[in-house]
Amino acid sequence: MANQPQIPLLKGKKALVVGIANEHSIAYGCAKAFRELEADLAITYLNEKAKPYVEPLAQALQAPIVMPLDVSQPGELEALFAAITAQWGRLDILVHSIAFAPKADLQGGLLNCSAAGFAQAMDISCHSFIRMARLAAPLMTEGGTMFAMTYHGATEVAPNYNVMGPVKAALESACRYLAYELGRNGIRVHAISPGPLKTRAASGLKDFDLLLNEAASRAPLGELVDIMDVGFTCAFLATRYARRLTGSTVYVDGGVNIMA
């Protein structure tokens, strides 16, 4: 049977995807899935060092807006949304797929995490999503969908996840409260919880290869997920077929989360 063409369920929708570092990034899987359904993309890169890795991907996805964004730098987030407002005048989809903690605080255990490191991890990994939502909501005049990436270590102890566990727990809670506050405007908010993936961000976790192997052996489906599994889940949730779903933490992990 011949492959059927993709139905352009997101045709004309405007999607901002934050967090692409390279072709292995979860955010890239989201951008690629949105583009397959014919959404228009705005893509960001962290800095000039990251630009050569991200810009070719953005060009391949025909993204008309490609801009730098370091959420820790004053004014960069506002400049991005000013450009989106000027070019599109609206926004339908927002993907927040960024997280950071200083290496010493990430690998040193929660008990030894510094106040400064905890605050920086919370600001970049959690509060920046709230700041983005604040700027995105006025542009979602016909409703929209917002996504933030979390991990199962937010609700269960994942050895070596350390400070990111409490930070991701805060992010999941923020998603629920934003879903409540923005629901009256037709804006839906989801936390997406992928299983372990070989991304650049994950490489900073101690003994991450062991975590990958364990997840693959415990998953009811018997294999790890990939970035397109995450992307297609977000694409579905952004369509009209998921119009009454909001505020949930959606696991894309082959079922690992149900295992004791």
Image: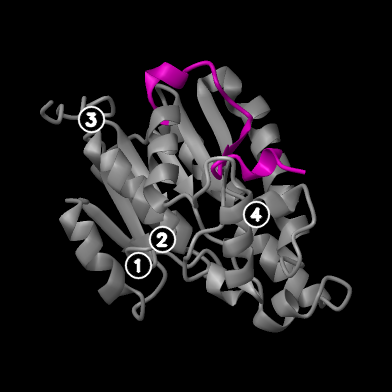
Q: Quadrant of residue 191?
A: top right
Cβ–Cβ below 8 Å for labels 2 and 1? Answer: yes
Question: Eyeballing the image, is 87 above or below 10?
Answer: below
Question: Eyeballing the image, is 250 above or below 193?
Answer: above
Three-letter amino acid code at disc 1?
Answer: Asn
- Which residue is nearer to you in this view: 174 or 156? 156
59 relative position to 126: left or right: left
Counting residues from the start of the chain, the first of labels 4 and 1 encountered is 1
Q: How far apart are marks 4 and 3 (CA)?
A: 29 Å
Quickly name the residue at label 1: 22
Counting residues from the start of the chain, the first of labels 1 and 3 encountered is 3
Quarter of the N terminus within the rendering: top left
- Mark 2 or 3, closer to the camera: 2
Quickly name the residue at label 3: 12
Judged from the image, the secondary structure of the residue bearing numbered disc 3 is loop
Three-letter amino acid code at disc 2?
Answer: Ser
Quickly name the residue at label 2: 25
3 relative position to 119: left or right: left
Question: Eyeballing the image, is 189 above or below 224?
Answer: above
Q: Residue 226 appears at what percent x and percent y?
A: 42, 52
